[in-house]
Image (tube, rainbow, N blue to C red):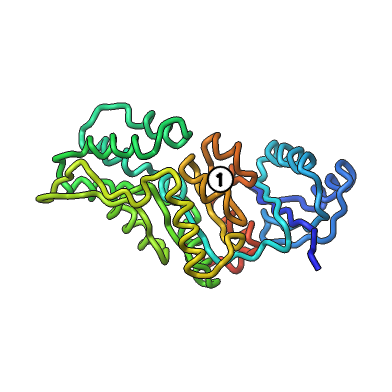
Amino acid sequence: MINKDQVLTIVGTESIAIEQISKQLVENYNINIISTKQLSNNAYDVVIPSIEQDKIKELRKVFFQKKIDCCFQSIDNREKKILLSDMDATIIENETLDDLVKISGVTANIDETSRLAMEGKIDIRTTLSLRVNFLKNKPKSLIDQVLVGIKFHPGSKTLVQTLNAKGYITSLITGGFAPISTFVGNKLGFHNIVSNEFKFENDKFTGEYIPITGEKNSKLNYLNQLTAEKNIDKSQVVAVGDGANDLGMLTNVGLGLGYHAHEIVKEQVDNQILFNDLTTILYYLGFRQEEFILD
């Protein structure tokens, strides 16, 4: 028998008054509370009957005003087996290709080019080729400077280590480049690292690259490949990203999440993380804080 109930997960920037929120749901929105489960002082699961999309949109606005992240999902579809994660501006704060071009001394407006690509206004392959070409004949050793400057987003290691311990397959799938992606993925413990690769000659950038993830639908293609290989339904995948090139995977999995995302992702992906760190994903998956493997 199909259970049509939904689980609403709420994650606040501070402690949540669950009694007050439950009262609002009942009195202001006529929503029956089936059960609540505390995940931490600032995170709760609230099981409710399935409600219409208009009411969900209204509730998202209410939680947004309270600076509470929220996620609505079907109870029957909650269990996941795979994590797919973007790298730049998701797992780490940096846009590493932009950092590399800047360190090389190029004065072009790289930030603007990257922003337009992430908003879907420039073809990703075109902008990658442009930025990589700026590196032609620059020393490979510039990568070491980028690695030193990498800042991991809070909760990144806890997210990956906890899901690894829970038996998930964890994949870092990025439009970024090896060996930077390899450093990030190995540091956090991702099982798989999928990215573009720079081409070098005599320890210098050639200005070209191997476009493993440089196509519009490359992340969707990887999702299809991995789920087929592992015989896992795409409904059992959680994916997180911030830009237009993540939409293929975010909109074709059981739980797609925007993380402090660009507007195009906010418009096309229902569930978002706007206020909290990456451990919010663990709450959305139903894990209690005491189950987290801390950094």
Q: Viewer-proximal residue, 247 or 287?
A: 247
Where residue 208 appears, as percent x and y from the top left, is 22, 43
Q: Which residue appears at 47% of the width and 34% of the height?
A: 120
Where residue 119 appears, as percent x and y from the top left, is 48, 34
Where residue 294 appears, as percent x and y from the top left, is 50, 64
Find disc 1 in the rendering and name its residue: 258
Q: Which residue appears at 54% of the width and 46% of the height?
A: 259
Number of numbered discs overlaid on the protein picture: 1
From the viewer's perspective, tell me whether residue 133 is left or right of residue 70: left
Whether 268 is drawn above or below 252: the answer is above
Where residue 232 appears, as percent x and y from the top left, is 56, 67
Quadrant of the rendered structure where residue 129 is?
top left
From the viewer's perspective, tell me whether residue 160 is left or right of residue 272: left
Q: Viewer-proximal residue, 110 or 222?
A: 222
From the viewer's perspective, tell me whether residue 241 is left or right of residue 210: right
Quadrant of the rendered structure where residue 284 is?
bottom right
Quadrant of the rendered structure where residue 183 is?
bottom left
Q: Which residue appears at 78% of the width and 60% of the height?
A: 36
Q: Viewer-proximal residue, 147 or 220?
A: 220
Q: Amino acid at mark 1?
A: Gly
Q: Viewer-proximal residue, 37 or 281?
A: 281
Whether 59 is drawn above or below 19: the answer is above
Q: Quadrant of the N terminus?
A: bottom right
